[in-house]
Amino acid sequence: MQKIYVLYKLKPGVSPEEYIEWSKTVDQAITSKQKGVQSFRVFLIDGARGKESPWDVVEDIEADSWDAWEEVLTQPAMKEVVAGFQKYAERDSSIAIYGREIL
């Protein structure tokens, strides 16, 4: 199991309400059903301790592996998700990090 976090800012002019609607009806609805995705949760950041958060959104993903996640992103079913991400997310702010639990 691979833990993945995707963090990004919303593009200027994108309201949280507009983003939330897209996230629930498109992003979460499609991504969570892809082969290789065990869990997909999305969080809107409300604040940060002591300073402004550099991100607006955190996606918390559990996938079979990093390679499996990369494969998910190329699937035809994800075309609408990728297009929406390009519409709502500030690409230069986006970072995808992955790791494993320390046991």
Image (spheres, rainbow, N blue to C red):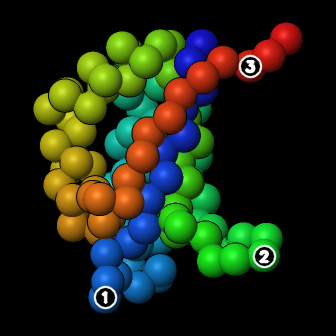
**Proximity of marks 3 and 1: CB atoms separated by less than 8 Å:** no
For the N terminus, the image quarter is: top right
Whole-percent x, y for residue 86 in the image = 21, 59
Give the quadrant of residue 102. Answer: top right
72 left or right, relative to 86: right
**Residue indicated by mark 3:** 101
How packed is label 1: few (under 14 Cα within 10 Å), some, or many (20 or more)?
few
Q: Amino acid at mark 3?
A: Glu
**Residue indicated by mark 1:** 13
Residue found 26% across the figure and 32% down from its top:
73
Q: Amino acid at mark 2?
A: Gly
Q: Is residue 48 visible?
A: yes
Whole-percent x, y for residue 101 in the image = 74, 19
**Residue indicated by mark 2:** 50
C-alpha span from label 2 to label 3 = 27 Å
C-alpha span from label 3 to label 1 = 37 Å
6 left or right, relative to 94: right
Residue 83 against residue 15 in the figure, above or below: above
Residue 10 against residue 17 in the figure, above or below: above
Could you say whether the residue bearing mark 2 is in a helix, strand or loop? loop
- Which of the pair 34/6 is nearer the observer? 6
The answer to which of marks 1 and 2 sits earlier in the sequence is 1
Residue at the far front: name it: 50
For the C terminus, the image quarter is: top right
